[in-house]
Image (tube, rainbow, N blue to C red):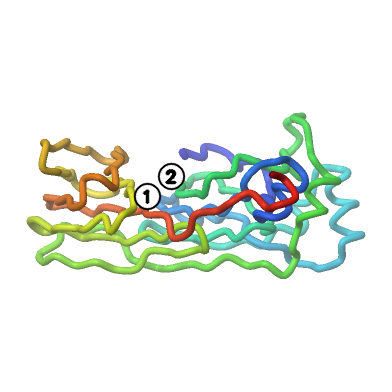
């Protein structure tokens, strides 16, 4: 995502709400900041718990300006947005999004651009107390040794950040993985062959590969599912 201007202010439902309201999975998302202009901020959370004030601000499309909690970010930050969190990517931020399987988005503010808002459904799932989790990993520098760091984790996915100086091996452990190059270039290999990932490119490693390698120098995001969500009984 390359935000030249503030993106719409949104909220996503949790799993149970999404199935009840839309017949869809819930949505958890996380942003890895690739680059950010000086002073760039994003919205993550509400600055008030007064739902009457929030509804009034949503009615005139000012909820983002008046009550969006601004969070300053820089290259290498990983921001986890739980379901129910008011959020919007801010102008001047270039980011990779990692998300769960749901596609339901309720827009509460569009900065006057005139697109449809989803106020009633959005407020049905909004959690004014929900705040982001920010992990400051630091900007990418060509690594001199191999290292992995926790990137972010939710109930549905986990991301490991691999700074690869030469070559690292990973096990699938029965799960597919998505490898995303966020610094340098990464050659991703399995028994059948390899693929070269340039900056911002991704590939999927099937669970059947069992193991795979990443050759740098590079920084790569290794994203895997942590749980397999099922449809609640009442929706079967």
Left or right, residue 23 beside residue 39: right
Residue of label 1: 34
The residue closer to the viewer here, 206 or 12, is 206
Left or right, residue 90 beside residue 95: right
Q: Secondary structure at mark 2?
A: strand
Q: Residue at x 37, y 54 (%)?
A: 224
Quadrant of the image containing the C terminus: top right
In the orientation shown, which residue stands out farthest toward the left?
166
Image quadrant assignment for residue 68: bottom right
Q: Is residue 47 above or below residue 92?
A: below
Tell me, yes or no, whether the two marked residues, 1 and 2, touch with CB atoms within 8 Å: yes
The residue closer to the viewer here, 124 or 111, is 124
Q: Which mark is residue 94?
A: 2
The local crowd at label 1, few if under 14, some if 14 to 19, many if 20 or more residues have their Cα within 10 Å, is many
In this view of the protein, can residue 141 be seen by the observer? Answer: yes
The local crowd at label 2, few if under 14, some if 14 to 19, many if 20 or more residues have their Cα within 10 Å, is many
Q: Residue at x 68, y 47 (%)?
A: 10
Relative image position of residue 104 (x, y in whole percent): 66, 41
Relative image position of residue 171 (x, y in whole percent): 21, 58
The residue closer to the viewer here, 196 or 74, is 196
């Amino acid at each position: 995502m390359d935000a030249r201007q503030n993106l719409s202010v949104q909220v996503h439902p949790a799993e149970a709400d999404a199935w009840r309201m839309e017949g869809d999975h819930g949505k958890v998302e996380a942003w890895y900041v690739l680059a950010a202009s000086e002073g760039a901020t994003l919205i993550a959370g509400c600055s008030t718990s007064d739902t009457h004030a929030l509804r009034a601000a949503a009615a005139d499309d000012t909820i983002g300006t008046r009550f969006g909690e601004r969070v300053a970010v820089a290259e290498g930050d990983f921001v986890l947005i739980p379901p129910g969190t008011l959020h919007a990517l801010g102008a001047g931020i270039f980011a990779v999004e990692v998300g769960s399987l749901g596609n339901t988005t309720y827009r509460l503010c569009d900065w006057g651009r005139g697109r449809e808002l989803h106020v009633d459904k959005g407020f049905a799932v909004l959690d004014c107390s929900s705040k982001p989790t920010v992990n400051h990993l630091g900007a990418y520098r060509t690594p001199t040794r191999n290292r992995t760091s926790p990137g972010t984790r939710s109930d549905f996915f986990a991301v490991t950040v691999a700074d690869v100086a030469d070559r690292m091996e990973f096990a699938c452990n029965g799960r597919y993985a998505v490898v995303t190059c966020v610094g340098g270039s990464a050659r991703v290999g399995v028994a059948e062959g390899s693929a070269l990932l340039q900056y911002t490119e991704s590939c999927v490693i099937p669970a059947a590969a069992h193991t795979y390698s990443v050759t740098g120098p590079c920084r790569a995001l290794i994203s895997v599912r942590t749980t397999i969500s099922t449809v609640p009984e009442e929706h079967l």
